[in-house]
Image: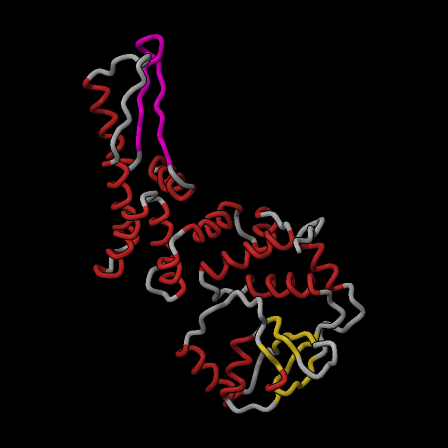
Amino acid sequence: MRQALGKGIDALISKVQNNNISQEAVHKIPVDSIRPNRRQPRRDFDETSLAELVQSIKEHGLLQPITVWPDDDGSSFELIAGERRWRACKAAGLKEVDSIVKKGLSEQQKFGLSLIENIQRKDLNAIEAALAYRHLMDEFSVSQTDIARKLGKSKSAVSNTLRLLELDDEIQKGIQGGAIHEGHARALLSIPDRDKRKEAYEKILTEKSSVREIEDYARGFHARRPRAKPAGDRRHKSPEVLDIEARLEKHLGAKVEITPGAAPENGKITIHYYSLDDFDRITRILKK
């Protein structure tokens, strides 16, 4: 059930921090009594880096405790944050793991705190972060503005990350698996035609195309889009105006319309964009 937070993420955190428990007490908990968080946004764990962490734990021990909450009977625990460290401790053969135990939380508070703990991690991929944002918005009515403020990001950055969920599942899996970069994904978003977008995605995989090359591909796609016929009441455009329109479209990779005004010395130039990423791309070109 969706539950509004009132003041957003800060309200959720204050509820957690106001519980009469010690937030800093570290306990040694049996590794096997801990289970993964069912709402963990992270889906993939790099085997190489995990192996390196296992070796580090064997040599130096666990340097940062994990965070858990107890089940009702207190005999088992669910992770809030630190699944990678917990997995490494198990692989290293540890019987117990240092843990910070948080108690007295409602299910809504557990859910929100878990997401907040995880989306502040640096190693989430873009799709995992987008899914975490979406969970916060859907379950707690947290706004994009509130998420952006808490994470120290711009609202457009949060919005652009969320838009990655509009991509086909195949492309999302490519992002999660590291087959393509987030920059590639943003460039693909600027291609509204699904077939052409998939064609560009395959181009990245087979030709190792750079982000710049895919942006160029997207600009070329927009430049090749069929031009809409002028409305019947518009002034007839001269060959010179049509030529300028074509040159601007080629430069910007977007549809451009020049509409003459009532007098020869005035009029307007309209530049079309098809997504927020497309808008950002065009504004970067105009600012140069």
**Left or right: 181 in relation to 102:** left
Location of residue 170 with respect to 149 vertically, above or below: below
Residue 94, given in percent of the width and then of the height, sits at 56, 90
Q: Name the quadrant containing residue 278.
A: top left
Tell me what residue is drawn at x 59 percent, y 62 percent.
115
Quarter of the rendering occupied by the C terminus:
top left
Question: In the shown orientation, is residue 233 left or right of residue 82?
Answer: left
The verdict on residue 257 being magenta is yes
Residue for point 61% across, 81% down: 34
- Which color scheme does this rendered protein use? secondary structure
Quarter of the image holding residue 69?
bottom right
Give percent across and percent down for residue 16: 73, 64
Write the residue at 38% across / 66% down.
Answer: 177
In the figure, 226 relative to 65: above or below? above
Residue 157 vertical position relative to residue 177 in the rendered view, above or below = above
Question: Residue 146's spot in the image, x, y percent?
Answer: 61, 49
Residue 266, percent from left and from top: 35, 13
Q: Quadrant of the N terminus?
A: bottom right
The part of the image, by quadrant, that contains residue 246 is top left
Q: Nearer the viewer, residue 259 or 192?
A: 192
Which residue of the protein is positioned furthest toward the right in this rendering?
20
Residue stretch rendered in magenta on the structure: 255-273
Does the magenta portion include 259? yes
Q: Is residue 112 above or below residue 49?
A: above
